[in-house]
Structure formats: structure tokens, C-alpha cells
Amino acid sequence: MNLFISGWAGFREALGNIPEEWNFVCPFIDFNEEELISFLREKSGQTVVGWSTGGHIILKNLKFFADRFEKIIVVAGFIKFTKYVNSRVLRRMIDRMAKKPEDVVKEFLISAGCNSLFPKFEKAKLIEGLNFLISSEVVDFPQIKGKLILIHGIHDRILPVDALKELNTVFPFAKSFLLSRPHWIGFEEILKARTLGFPQGSC
């Protein structure tokens, strides 16, 4: 299978062009981190793409995903979100989610370069995701060769390019792409990196 793990509030409607044949997971709307790992424990496939929060979850469990997927693409990934975005920003979002959750989601999606389209949602699940971003951190850095591709947008208004630079430091074997895009790169651009990432037979 091919699997796309989206970002916070990264509904399929907001991203617009994820093919129907790709399995799609929106973190905390569908599964939290532990539930996702449990769901995938007996599964495997060709490519897993993780965007933002989804990419962070992949990086936290990199060996788990490397054992199950032939190629791993992380878009707008990070080791610890609050190293680049002050936790006060997330706490303000949590406070606003209690009163005007649709406004918070719409503003985020616009800033991320997505469509401002989304279905009805349980605000408690998205609040859980924001609390996750405040505390979650990658602490293990297995050196997986020939599988990991990192992509980041130069015009990302959510997460600075320094997040990619840090990932390049701790994952020196990863192939890295810096594109003239916002936080959401676009699925077709992501798949181009899949074909350009590593030569056939790379270990």
C-alpha cells in the first residue's frame, strides 16, 4: 500500500489532490500516535508520506516505518515543534479552539497554503493534537540509508527552514529537497521527490 499521514487539521478536502488509491490518515482525527502505530503493526507497503505532524510521527518511529515501507518521504518535518514555534502560540490556538474552532482551522489552512475546506470535526481531537505538538520530540535518530527523503518549502509560514537544516544534521544519509513552496508542498511535487530521491539499488 501507499500511505499518506497528514498534518494537524490536514483534512483530505484541504489538501485537494491526494489520489483516492492512497490510504489517508489525519492525525488525531483518525488516530493518535499510539493508535496509528498499532494500526500499522501488521501492514507494509511501498511509500509512506508524512506531512508536518504526520512527518514528525514518522521521524519519532523511523525504524518502525523503515521496516514496513520501501520509501519514506517527510514533508515539513521537525524534531520538536516548539523549538521553532513558541508554545504560547499553540496555547492561544487551544484557547480559541474552545470558542471558534472553525476560525482557527481556517486561519491555519490558509497560512499553510492549503484550501480552506474541511468537514465537520470534533474540536477535542484537534486540541489533543495541539497539546501533542507542545510536548512531542524526536529523541532517537536511526541511520536508515536509502529510504528517507526530506522536503521543505522556502516560503513556509508555519515552520522555518531551520527545521530542515536540523534534520539534515541528525539524518545525514537522507536526501533533502528545498522547494519554492509554502508549508503544504503539493502532492505532485512530493511524488517527484520520490522518483528523484535515490538511485535504484541504493542501500
Image: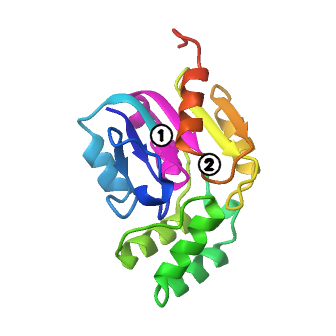
Residue nearest the observer in this picture, 23 or 134: 23
Left or right position of 14 against 68: right
Q: Which mark is residue 151?
A: none
Residue that carries the numbered disc 2 in the rendered image: 76
Upstream in sequence: badge 2 or badge 1:
1
- Whole-angstrom CA distance, mark 2 to mark 1, is 11 Å
Q: Is residue 116 above or below residue 5?
A: below
Q: Is residue 58 magenta-colored?
A: yes
Quadrant in which residue 129 is drawn: bottom left
Q: Residues within 10 Å of mark 2 (few under 14, many from 20)?
A: many
In the image, taking residue 121 as reference, residue 164 lies left or right, namely right
Corner quadrant of residue 115: bottom right
Say what secondary structure mark 1 lies in. Answer: strand
Query: Which amino acid type corresponds to the residue marked 2 in the rendered image?
Result: Ala
Which one is nearer the viewer's eye here, 147 or 5? 5
Q: Can you tell which mark lies on residue 49?
A: 1
Residues in magenta?
A: 49-78
Q: Position of residue 92 (x, y in %)?
A: 60, 83
- For image coordinates 69% across by 66% down, the residue present is 85
Instruction: Name the image quarter holding the N terminus.
Output: top left
Q: Is residue 30 visible?
A: yes
Residue 100, horizontal then vertical, whole percent: 49, 87
Q: Nearer the viewer, residue 181 or 62?
A: 181
Q: Position of residue 105 (x, y in %)?
A: 52, 73
Residue 11 seen in this snapshot = no
Which residue: 49% across, 71% down?
131
Q: Amino acid at mark 1?
A: Val
On screen, residue 99 versus residue 192, left or right, reads left
